[in-house]
Amino acid sequence: MAFTLPELNYSFDALEPHIDAKTMEIHYSKHHNGYVSKLNAAVEGSPLADKSLEALMSECSSHSPAVRNNGGGHYNHSLFWASMAASKGGAPTGDLLEAMNSSFGSFDAFKEEFTKAAGTRFGSGWAWLVEKDGKLAVGSTPNQDNPLMDCSDFKGNPLLNLDVWEHAYYLNYQNRRPDYIGAWWNTVNWDEVERRLKSL
Ligand code: MN
């Protein structure tokens, strides 16, 4: 298979009480796994099977909706799992904090803007922190679109994302998306977000 489900670096219950084990298990084993399977089916036997996921995203306007939706689903969830860890949260430090201060004024101002982007994304989608042209920016995308896609209205180098599909929170939070967003901040692995920024 061209694409594989990445390993989770923590157990399903590692993010409790903020994200419950059952949601993690279904989200990872069923939803993400489904995107990987459908992406493999969509590229099987074609030259696309030899391309990187990032390459498929950057030229996704040339490909089928199956590649866009399932490739995006695979990329977005892979980044999402790696952005979280047990006993994290708090505030970033170092270069990442400096970049936030420079682009948003403060960490709190960034957090407010990101929370708003996640809360106001209508229907299913994702909120993002990206780097673009030396600055940080916040935005959101519908469905499984992401800022690497040439067809996305919001572009940049992804640093952090938040899944606001109902499948990400409905078991524990039902319709209370703001509560899920508020709890999710306690799981963010800022060391990983800073590593992404420095690797650009
Ligand atoms: Mn999801």
Image (cartoon, grey):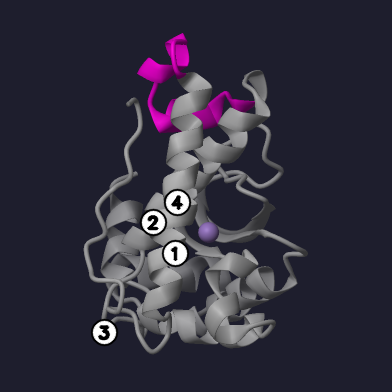
Magenta segment includes 46: yes
Quarter of the image containing the C terminus? top left
> What number is the disc on residue 87?
3
Q: In screen coordinates, is 25 left or right of 166?
A: left
Foreground pick, 67 / 53: 67
In the figure, 37 relative to 18: above or below?
Answer: above
Residue occupying the point 32% across, 38% down: 4
In the figure, 165 relative to 197: above or below?
Answer: below
The mark closer to the camera, 4 or 1, is 1
- The residues bearing labels 1 and 2 have C-alpha atoms spaced at a distance of 5 Å
- Badge 1 density bin: few <14, some 14–19, many ≥20, Cα 10 Å: some
- The residues bearing labels 1 and 3 have C-alpha atoms spaced at a distance of 22 Å
> What number is the disc on residue 118?
none
Quarter of the image containing the N terminus? top left
The mark closer to the camera, 2 or 4, is 2
The residue at which mark 4 appears reads as: 32
Main secondary-structure element of the magenta-colored stretch: helix
Classify mark 1 as within 8 Å of ligand 1 or not, answering yes or no: no
The type of residue carrying mark 3 is Ser
Residue occupying the point 29% across, 81% down: 88
Under tag 4, what secondary structure? helix
The residue at which mark 1 appears reads as: 26
Residue occupying the point 40% across, 18% down: 49
Residue 77 placement (x, y as % from top left): 44, 53
Q: Which residues are magenta?
A: 44-60
Q: Earlier in the sequence, mark 2 or mark 3?
A: 2
Classify mark 4 as within 8 Å of ligand 1 or not, answering yes or no: yes
